[in-house]
């Protein structure tokens, strides 16, 4: 059974304080690793797809990386508007997207 | 360009009743997936429709059923509602039955009393 575990569950940062979110996955035949951002009362918003170990993607203050067992979402010099829940999801050979429980990020001004 | 739209946004039902939720995919998308998200949890896969057929199904009972129409829109039906069915129901669309990223709507908040 495919499993995705995210840590930490919650993270509070001061504005400008860089950090990383972790996503560990156990998936049969990884076809893609996805990162989403979810704001309260909204649906998840797509951020990145990573397909193979060693791949990196960047968007503004966010950078996602992938190894054979984990993915990291690095947040550089975050701003209060980066506060949200960040979800990681893995697509395996069964073609069912399995989500982690998310990391709730709060960036304080 | 309209994104994924879902209706209604909120719904309150009584235990034992039946409910139908609706979804229109993003323009250009032909595949629709449904997810259930409990409070504080990640979305859980219910099923996926492509070319009007259910292609994949998650670990949900037969009380959960769906349909996809020729215009790619979709419905999620839940029969014999239980208190535990209270959740945010998310619809997501994508292009083709492959590995492209899902685009989500803002969901329907279902409360079962």
Image: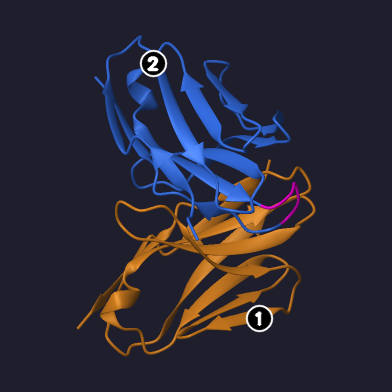
Residue A13 visible to an observer of this rendering: no
Q: Residue B50's mark?
A: none
Left or right of residue B14, residue B20 in this image? right
Counting from the top left corner in percent of width and height, residue A107 is at: 27, 77
Left or right of residue B69, residue B105 in this image? left
Crowding near pointer 2: few (<14 within 10 Å), some, many (20+)?
many
Q: Is residue B75 above or below residue A21?
A: above
Q: Chain of mark 2?
A: B
Left or right of residue B42, residue B109 in this image? left
Question: In the figure, what tint was chain B given?
Answer: blue
Residue identifier under label 1: A56
Counting from the top left corner in percent of width and height, residue B20 is at: 43, 23
Give the residues drawn in magenta, as a range. Answer: B95-99
Left or right of residue B66, residue A20 in this image? left
Q: Is residue B26 above or below residue A67?
A: above
**x 40%, y 14%: residue:** B18
The secondary structure that most of the magenta stretch takes on is loop
Instruction: Measure how far apart labels 2 and 1 are at the Cα level.
Output: 44 Å
Q: Residue furthest left?
A: A109
Rendering quarter of residue A83: bottom left
Residue A31 visible to an observer of this rendering: yes
**x 52%, y 29%: residue:** B75
Question: In the figure, what tint was chain A given?
Answer: orange
Relative depth, front residue between A65 and A81: A81
| Quarter of the image where the C terminus of chain B is located | top left
Relative depth, front residue between A3 and B110: B110
Q: Chain of mark 1?
A: A
**x 64%, y 67%: residue:** A49
Residue identifier under label 2: B81
**x 37%, y 38%: residue:** B108
Q: Is residue A5 above or below residue A105?
A: above
């Amino acid at each position: 059974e495919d499993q995705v575990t995210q840590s930490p569950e919650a993270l509070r940062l001061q504005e400008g304080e860089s950090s990383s979110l972790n996503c560990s996955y156990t998936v049969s035949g990884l076809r893609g690793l996805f990162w989403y951002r979810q704001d309260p009362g909204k649906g998840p918003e797509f951020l990145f797809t990573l397909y193979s170990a060693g791949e990196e993607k960047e968007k503004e203050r966010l950078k996602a990386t992938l190894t054979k067992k984990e993915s990291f979402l690095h947040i550089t010099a975050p701003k209060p508007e980066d506060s949200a829940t960040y979800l990681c999801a893995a697509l395996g050979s069964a073609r069912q997207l399995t989500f982690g429980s998310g990391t709730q990020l709060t960036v304080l001004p | 360009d309209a994104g994924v739209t879902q209706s209604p946004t909120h719904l309150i039902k009584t235990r034992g009743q039946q409910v139908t939720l609706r979804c229109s995919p993003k323009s250009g998308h032909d595949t629709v997936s449904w997810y259930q998200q409990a409070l504080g949890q990640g979305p859980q896969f219910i099923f996926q429709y492509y070319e009007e057929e259910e292609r994949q199904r998650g670990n949900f009972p037969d009380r959960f059923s769906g349909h996809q129409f020729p215009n790619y829109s979709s419905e999620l039906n839940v029969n014999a509602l239980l208190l535990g069915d209270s959740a945010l129901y998310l619809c997501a669309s994508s292009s083709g039955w492959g590995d492209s990223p899902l685009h989500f709507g803002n969901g329907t908040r279902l409360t079962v009393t």
